[in-house]
Image: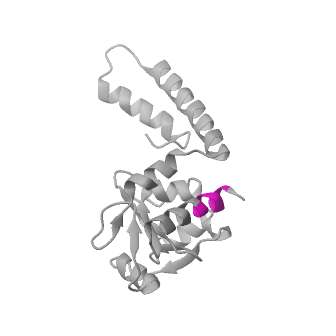
């Protein structure tokens, strides 16, 4: 079983334990975890992205709007996966969820009215790293170390803290690491 399907299996087990009909992953961190690193965010300072994932016992849906759908499917590589795209207006993500779940019991990875907040159990699932995730973390550590080394080499006497932070941010971003 591949990484995505192992995680889906874990989420569905959690749903069964909690008596849920669906689980709505809204957090950027949960989205990235389930997809193996896909970016759902537009604003890096946000907790929730422009896309989410709805998991049911039979399917997993990519919920997003018509603006972000092409980027997610093409740039983030989600077109080849097992997420079924469900496009809705940007201002009504909950309508998409309710159209798919109906009156079923819904869990989420953060507070949302009328849902079971499973942020704790989902964070625990995310902390149980699979071998591909462990390898990605090793690679990330190497890129971060290289970024730090490069930034430190550019520091000059008299530079202000903000200038040094900007150097480090630049060195991480050119290595495709978000500071």
How many numbered circles are shown? 0
Q: Which residue is more in the foreground, 114 or 154?
A: 114
Q: Is residue 21 visible?
A: yes
Residue at (34%, 79%) from the top-left corner?
92
Question: Percent from the top left, x then y, of residue 136?
Answer: 62, 42
Specify whether 111 is left or right of 144: left
Q: In the image, is residue 8 part of the stretch drawn in magenta?
A: yes
Q: Quadrant of residue 137?
A: top right
Quadrant location of the N terminus in the rendered image:
bottom right
Asked if 100 appears above or below 133 in the picture, the reply is: below
Front-most of 32 and 171?
32
Task: Specify the principal SS of the magenta part.
Answer: helix
Residue reaching furthest to the left = 113
Which picture quadrant has residue 141?
Answer: top right
Report the residue that reaches farthest toward the right: 1
Tell whether 132 sits left or right of 85.
right
> Residue 99: image x %, image y %?
42, 86
Asked whether residue 75 appears in the rendered view, the answer is no
Residue 142 in the image: state x and y as whole percent.
60, 31
Give how far across and how far down residue 170 sits, in percent. 46, 36
Q: How is the image coloured?
A: one colour
Instruction: Please state which of residues 137 and 129 is positioned toward the viewer in this rendering.
Output: 129
**Highlighted range, magenta:** 3-9
Q: Is residue 112 above or below residue 152?
A: below
Q: Nearer the viewer, residue 174 or 54?
A: 54
Residue 138 part of the magenta segment: no
In which quadrant will I find the C terminus?
Answer: top left
């Amino acid at each position: 079983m591949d990484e995505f399907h192992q995680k889906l299996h874990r989420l569905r087990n959690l749903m069964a334990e909690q008596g849920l009909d669906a689980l709505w992953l809204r957090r950027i961190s949960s989205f990235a975890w389930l997809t193996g690193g896909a970016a759902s965010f537009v604003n890096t300072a946000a907790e929730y992205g422009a896309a989410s994932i709805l998991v049911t016992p039979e399917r997993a849906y990519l919920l997003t709007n018509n603006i972000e759908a092409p980027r997610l499917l093409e740039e983030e590589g989600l077109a080849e996966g097992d997420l079924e795209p469900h496009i809705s207006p940007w201002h009504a993500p909950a309508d998409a969820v309710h159209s798919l779940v109906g009156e079923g019991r819904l869990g989420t990875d953060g507070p949302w009215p009328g849902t079971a907040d499973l942020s704790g159990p989902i964070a625990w699932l995310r902390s149980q790293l699979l071998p591909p995730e462990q390898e990605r973390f090793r690679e990330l550590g190497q890129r971060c170390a290289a970024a730090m080394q490069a930034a430190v080499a550019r520091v000059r006497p008299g530079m202000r803290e903000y200038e040094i932070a900007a150097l480090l941010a630049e060195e991480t971003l050119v290595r495709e690491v978000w500071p």
